[in-house]
Amino acid sequence: MKNLLAILIAFPLLLASCVSTKKFKAAQAEYDQLQTKYVQIQSDLTGCNDAKAELLRQKSSLEGDNAGLNKRIADLNKQIDFLKENNTTVLSQLQSLSVVSSTQAESIKKSLENIGSKDDYIQTLQSSLARKDSLNMALVMNLKGAIGNLDDEDINIKVDKGVVYIDISDKLLFKSGKYEITAQAKTVLGKVATVLKNQPDVEFMVEGHTDNVPYRNAVLDDNWDLSVKRATEVVRILQKQYGLDPAKMVAAGRGEYSPVMDNSSAKNRAANRRTRIVILPQLDQFFKLLEPKK
């Protein structure tokens, strides 16, 4: 009887314990589900925040683009207004030009013809100058070929600003303080004369140059006299021994006043003592080009 009573007392307690365990497990399962949903919601919230941030960035970018487009539209509108204004001005000018008289039209026509003539004239001058440069270079090559391998310190042939120069040192032509041509100089002058003789239209000037050392003797007063005397001696040789036309030659003395170097050393003074043959430009032919065509 006592045992039965104990069983009857323990049964409700055991039944209650079983019921509590089932509720706990159900609650635990529900908690787990809620926890899973919470994690999912948190993840969704993070995604939404990221998407919101991206949308805000895109909004800001679009607002910047919109501002740039508005500025571009404003600039284009200004250009349109400017073009409209210019178009009005051009139309006004065209209307003025449309009433040009026949006399004015003829004047414009003559002006255009003059421009064309001047263009032809300029082209003719350029062609003539190019031809002259070619002839000068041919003359230089002929002179260098005739003279051969003579030391450049003794003779130098060049073209400067369209003019041919032949510089011959005085040590090759004359003895110190003298104006008589040496035998070696006559050989060199003969080679130069051969080339010049083949150019019958060429005119040239023989210039005498000295250094700045004072000079005087029984015949000559100074470097002026010496430079002129040396130039005339060269001209006489070219005329009398080599048959060059005297009407095509000029003798001139430059004294000490056109040096190629300062006279501070013996070497420089030697360079300044020279005889220069200058092939004169044919100015008459140039001036003929300037004359109006008939």
Image: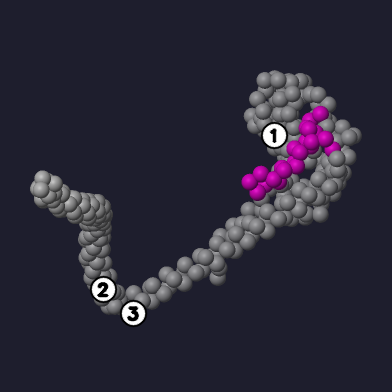
Q: Residue at position x 27%, y 78% from top?
A: 99
Q: Residue at position x 74%, y 21% from top?
A: 266
User: Residue 69, image x and y in percent?
Assistant: 25, 60
Which colouring convention does the figure follow? one colour
Q: Nearer the viewer, mark 1 or mark 2?
A: 2
Quadrant where the C terminus sits is bottom right
| Magenta-tinted stretch | 150-171
Q: CA distance from mark 3 to mark 2?
A: 21 Å
Q: Earlier in the sequence, mark 1 or mark 3?
A: 3
Please check the rendered image and state whether residue 193 is part of the magenta-colored stretch, yes or no. no
User: Residue 78, image x and y in percent?
Assistant: 22, 62
Q: Earlier in the sequence, mark 3 or mark 2?
A: 2
Q: Determine whether the residue tagged by mark 1 lies in a helix, strand or loop.
A: strand
Look at mark 3 in the image and give the residue it sits on: 102
In depth, the one of 19 and 144 nearer the eye is 19
Q: Earlier in the sequence, mark 1 or mark 2?
A: 2
State if disc 3 and disc 1 touch (CB < 8 Å).
no
Q: Determine whether the residue tagged by mark 2 lies in a helix, strand or loop.
A: helix
State if disc 2 and disc 1 touch (CB < 8 Å).
no
Q: Amino acid at mark 1?
A: Gly
Tag shown at residue 253:
1
Q: Relative to 281, does residue 231 appear above or below in the rendering?
A: above
Q: Amino acid at mark 2?
A: Leu
Q: Residue at position x 44%, y 71% from top?
A: 112
Q: CA distance from mark 1 to mark 3?
A: 63 Å
User: Residue 140, image x and y in percent?
Assistant: 76, 48
